[in-house]
Amino acid sequence: MAEEIDIYDRDRKETGLRLPRKAKLAPDQYMLYALALIENQDHRFLITQRSLDKKWAAGAWEIPGGGAQAGEDSFRSVCRETMEEVGLDVSGCEPTPIYSYRNDDAESGDNYFADIYHFHLDFTEDDVKLQKEEAIGFRLATEDEITELGKKGMFLHDRRIKLALENERGNIVGRE
């Protein structure tokens, strides 16, 4: 059976509807994503390079995360995705996102809410265990290095990550 997702309305209320993950969503239907901005003790962020066989953004850099499964809230989703993708356990960290936004793409049916969590974790490169289907590499990057990759069109969500960090520092409002 195909993995299912919960469907939300434009106000982020669950509709009670569940659909297969690959379903094209109607304009008023949304799924839920969660992203993990994982910062180590040296103030560097864990970023991963997407597998080259991905249909979208193959080879691009990003932060761990993904779609919530049916029955999951965003925190449980980000904990599961982080453990699966990079082998790090963030379940004992603060369960509050630092930034949330809604994406509307009626043409492709790629409508979603996304929560970005900022985790401070004591880890080294040796602790990272990549899921081969998801990523071909990783590195620890500064905020400036992420910005530079974004300027080159090589980093996904770089603008939203910058907004999330600015929000956390108190410079902007937390929802888009």
Image: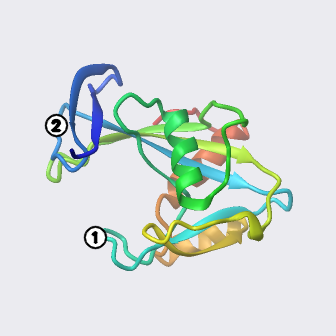
Q: Position of residue 175 (x, y in %)?
A: 50, 33
The residue that label 1 is drawn on is 55
Ranked by sequence position, the earlier of labels 2 and 1 is: 2
Q: Position of residue 69 (x, y in %)?
A: 37, 38
Kindly give the residue lying farthest to the right in the view shown: 41
Characterize the local packing of mark 1: few (<14), some (14-19) or many (20 or more) Cα atoms within 10 angstroms: few
Q: Position of residue 86 (x, y in %)?
A: 60, 60
The residue nearer to you, when weighing 117 against 93, is 93
For the residues carrying marks 2 and 1, which lies nearer the camera in this image? 1
Residue located at (70% from left, 45% from top): 119
Visible residue check, residue 171? no
**Mark 2 and mark 1 residues within 8 Å of each other at the beta carbon:** no
Q: Which mark is residue 27?
A: 2
Q: Quadrant of residue 99?
A: top right
The residue nearer to you, when weighing 148 against 88, is 88
Q: Is residue 83 left or right of residue 14?
A: right
